[in-house]
Amino acid sequence: MTPFEYERASDASDAVARVASHPNAAFLGGGTNLVDHMRLGVARPDLLVDVSRLPFADITSLPGGGFRIGAAVRNSDLAAHRGLRERYPMLSQALLAGASGQLRNLATTGGNLLQRTRCAYFQDVTTPCNKRNPGAGCAALEGHNRDHAILGASEHCVAVHPSDMAVALAALGAEVIVLGARGERRIAVTDFHRLPGSAPERDTVLERGDLITAVELPQLPMAANSAYYKVRDRASYAFALVSVAAALDVRNGRVADVRIALGGVAHKPWRALRAEAALRGAAATDECYSKAVDVELAEARPLRHNAFKVALARNLMRMMLRRLTSGVAS
Amino acid sequence: MEASITLRVDGEKRSLRVDTRTTLLDALRERLGVTSVKKGCDHGQCGACTVLVDGRRVTTCLSLAVALDGARVTTSRGLAQGGRLHPVQQAFLDHDALQCGYCTPGQVCSAVGMLEEARAGHPSFVTEGVTPPAQLSDEEIRERMSGNLCRCGAYVNIVAAVRAAMRQESAP
């Protein structure tokens, strides 16, 4: 690990100013991903600005019926919030599907959104990686790419975003509240993470010094009938091969509204907007579900070792829609 | 680059200067001589370094000591009170829940923290409904302990030990 200065921010503006004015600084939240990257040599900040003690650890109700989740709320506390677990079960399930009890006690809401890909080549500094070292090439393209993207990838990067929580937030239409050098702004979770294109070194649309202060969940009654399902190589404590977050509102045998997002398939949480559009107003039947899901996956471009993900995503979305049609998926 | 910090480790106040790069794990073992916390993978993947920080179970290999100034740290050693083992420690012995024993301090701290989480109503991925039942099923125990690996494969007896400790603690 390279040496670094450590400072504790006195408030959010102070934190933003400290990082914005320094060419190689990073915010420190729970540290579960950043400290590991510093040890691996993937990240080499020379200043850490600790934001973990800033007063952003509360979950509050919004006047319109939604919730505001402070950026420093720990993953375990967010998952255990009773009101959220009743009204947005997919969010709690997604959080509990990620990492372990120990890590969820450390990891923060803001940090979860900003965690970086677990692509083995990204984390191994002896291999070429355009995300870690722009222009170096991509070892995963012709390498072991079983865990990699099937949607929205580029010739420069085929990494996937690792978060479970962000998949649920994308499906729910949540917004990220960001404080930057020029004030506060709101970014939809679906616009927050980027596709790799020719700049895979940029995971998100954030600029240097931008600090996540909260995430807001909109009022969404249909989310009471939602669930998160994750397929992984072992029963617990593993990243997703493919995951799906979905909410469904069926009335009189037709799909009144639907939300679907996929994890483990792209450089960002993949909101299945094409499938959703095909489903709205359609008959709530397996035949219609299959057609809609196929519309979404028509753009899939599997790599040498991950064609199974296309079939897995297809089956998972259909299964989830069937389960939600007959009530809460549990 | 160094900083002065104070930790309360197993009930004892300890002040020290640390390089900012020092993890809580290395501060405990290398600087304070607290070897009841074990270094396994050093990447947050095995759980051997689990302790309780301010009452919550965490891995210590991914926590920077400098960021934890003022924290209350309880290792497996500190769970024993007045020469008596903690009920979870005793249950691990009674159920032969170890072979080599290297992961055991982390397993014990994790189980203590996990049972407290369950008492506080925290759900797990396998919990149906909003809160867990008062008595965790074996499936619940396995899921909640999945952050602690045991390369000897003593899992069957670890589940038995945690189940026994849970029942003992909830007995009237």
Image: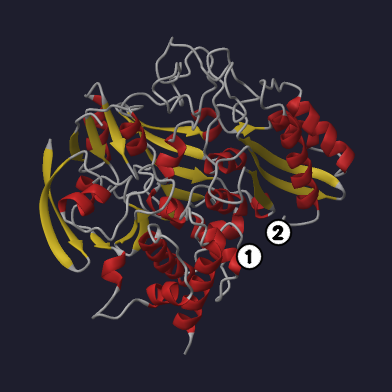
Q: Residues within 10 Å of mark 2 (few under 14, many from 20)?
A: few
Q: Is residue A270 left or right of residue A165?
A: right
Question: Dot 2: what SS?
Answer: loop
Query: Where B102 sits versus A43, above or below?
Result: below
Q: Residue at x 87, y 42 (%)?
A: A286
Q: Which residue is mark 1?
A: B129
**CB under 8 Å between discs 2 and 1:** yes
Tell me residue A171's x, y (percent): 62, 40
Asked if residue A301 shows in the view, the reply is yes
Question: Which chain letter goes with mark 1?
Answer: B
Q: Residue at x 37, y 57 (%)?
A: B102
The quarter of the rendered structure image containing the N terminus of chain A is: top left
In which quadrant will I find the C terminus of chain A? bottom right
What residue type is disc 2 on?
Answer: Ser
Picture coordinates of residue A305, whole percent (x, y): 66, 25
The single residue placed furthest to the bottom in the displayed view is B172
Relative depth, front residue between B117 and B73? B73
Can you say whether B113 is above or below A305 in the image?
Answer: below
Residue for point 25% across, 80% down: B83
Could you tell me which residue is drawn at 39 percent across and 44 percent down? B41
Numbered circle sitting on residue A330? 2
Task: List x then y, in percent, for residue A136.
Answer: 43, 11
Res A304 → quadrant: top right
Separation of marks 2 and 1 at Cα, in angstroms: 8 Å
Q: Quadrant of residue A16?
A: top left
